[in-house]
Image (spheres, helix red, strand yellow):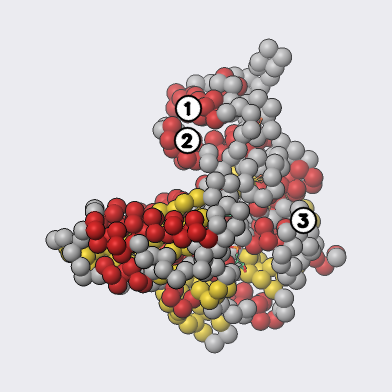
Amino acid sequence: MHPAPFAYKAAHSVEEALQLLRSHEDAKILAGGHSLIPALKLRLTQPALLIDISKISSLRGIRRENGKLIIGSGTTHREIEKSHLVAEASPLLASVAPQIGDVQVRHRGTFGGSLAHADPAGDWPAAALAVDAELVIAGAHGTRTVHASEFFTGMLTTVIQPDEILTEIKVPGEGTPGIYLKHRNAASGYATVGVAVTATHDHGRIGTVTIGVTGATPVAFRASVVEHALNGHAVSAHLLDEAASHAADGLECLSDIHAPAAYRSQLVKVMVRRALGKLLHA
Amino acid sequence: MEEHHVGITVEVNGRPHRSTVEPRTLLVDYLRDDLGLTGTHIGCDTGQCGACTIIVDGQSVKSCMVLAVQADGAHVRTVEGLAQDGRYHAVQQGFWEKHGLQCGFCTPGFMMQSVQILEDNPDPSDEEIRDALEGNLCRCTGYQNIVEAVKAAGATIRSGAETMAVGTGVGA
Ligand SMILES: Cc1cc2nc3c(=O)[nH]c(=O)nc-3n(C[C@H](O)[C@H](O)[C@H](O)COP(=O)(O)OP(=O)(O)OC[C@H]3O[C@@H](n4cnc5c(N)ncnc54)[C@H](O)[C@@H]3O)c2cc1C
Ligand code: FES
Ligand code: FES
């Protein structure tokens, strides 16, 4: 499988990349290429120009500022997996990273590329929703910041415009307990369903629970009904059972040869329950 | 299409190569077709099997999922570069000793990923080895001997023992 011909330019700054995007009709950003190259090979997309942003050093790295983790969009899954800072500041992200693909994939694929791609089976969208990440997007008129809840607009689509670049992602860095459970498709390794959960509790009482779900529907979502049923209540197995049983209420789940909609909807409920049990010990 | 060709400089197994490639050329095809380094195999072409695994700037990657232009300026290591100064790499010796291969199709990829594993940690646990080999598929040997091969290679590296001379065991 070979991609159709295209031109290639490596950008060395965000400015240069934005300039190239503006001055070329049919250009696409290339980050790790681990979603784009497969699509190019299948000729699902045939851009005239690829603008490689992987050599822009300012897009790479992880730091903590004012209690928040700031992760450059070009940071690889592997860098996040190996980061002590992430392990300490965001157990949820640390739980997601090693579950993506395999070591080789994680060496190339990027956090920002995965979010921008918005694959319905991608792992990061669930986590970004659960931690209410803020996504910083650069364009001709400066930067804007969008919350994860408003970032994903549909299958493989986000609010990023064709002339914009996702530059960094800010996530809370207080070390809130979190976990990612993934039911992997045996062949592809992608999530049939993945649930990303954070939860705080104190003396048997739940503080705040957040739940992001991927794989089940065309676009990842927050299971707000479950969150509301739990926040502020006393922890009990019965409460978790009851709340999780509503995790798939009203969902229109994806259906394919690997997992029909009813199976995905059952997985959502079971996996939300398991994740809650692990975090709240009930 | 002339204007679409791009000049790249890639160091492969210590030797610099200057080439002109079409941007759509995959790194694995560049190695195999342009440089004649056919030790890197193509199994699936979809990123699943790991047969095309090589090491780029110290990190293992599936070279069917990377464009040659993305390797401009990079240091690339392939299976052809494993043996040094007439001696096999400890990983090659491990695969030989522990019968870590049958048909050998997947072996270059497994060996390169094994090199990565042992460079990250020369004394990995069985579980760490299995986790890190997740992206490589073997359809004949079975993974047990491959894990044994990586462990044997780790032991050789840690002991600092000299590996066997290239050619040892051929025809044996
Ligand atoms: C074998 C294999 C297994 C995989 N398994 C998993 C898995 O288990 N879970 C999972 O979540 N993913 C998986 N992936 C996908 C992988 O995580 C990709 O790396 C990721 O989805 C995309 O990131 P990328 O950096 O490779 O982006 P690219 O492929 O370079 O780009 C993807 C899209 O996003 C756009 N884009 C990229 N960066 C930006 C930016 N900064 N601003 C604006 N637009 C941008 C590109 O134009 C393109 O449209 C797998 C991939 C492979 C090949
Ligand atoms: S040929 Fe590259 S992963 Fe199979
Ligand atoms: S030895 Fe034949 S596929 Fe692995």
Residue lying furthest top: B172
- Taking the spot 66% from the left edge, 81% from the top edge, the residue there is A22
- Within 10 Å of the Cα at label 2, are there few (<14), some (14-19), or many (20+) other Cα atoms? many
Q: Secondary structure at mark 3?
A: loop
Image quarter hosting the N terminus of chain B: bottom right
Distance, label 1 to label 3, CA atoms, is: 37 Å
Residue A278 in percent (x, y) is at: 29, 52
Residue A119 in percent (x, y) is at: 56, 64
Reading the image, the residue beneath label 1 is: B151
For the image, the number of numbered tags is 3
Q: Is residue B102 above or below residue A267?
A: above
Evaluate whether label 3 is on the same chain as label 2. Answer: no
Q: Is residue A224 above or below residue B7?
A: below
Name the subunit of mark 3: A
- Name the amino acid type tagged 3: His
- Taking the spot 71% from the left edge, 67% from the top edge, the residue there is A45
* Ligand 3 located in image quadrant: top right
Q: Which mark is residue A2?
A: 3
- Taking the spot 72% from the left edge, 53% from the top edge, the residue there is B26
Say whether marks 1 and 3 touch (CB < 8 Å): no
Say whether marks 1 and 2 touch (CB < 8 Å): yes
Q: Is residue B30 above or below residue A151?
A: above
- In the picture, measured across the screen, residue A225 lies left or right of residue B107, that is left
Closest to the camera, between mark 1 and mark 3, is: 3
Q: Secondary structure at mark 2?
A: helix
Tell me if residue A87 can be seen: no
Give the mark, 1 or 2, whose residue is nearer the N terminus.
2
Reading the image, the residue beneath label 2 is: B129
Tell me if residue A31 can be seen: yes
- Within 10 Å of the Cα at label 3, are there few (<14), some (14-19), or many (20+) other Cα atoms? some
- Name the amino acid type tagged 2: Ile
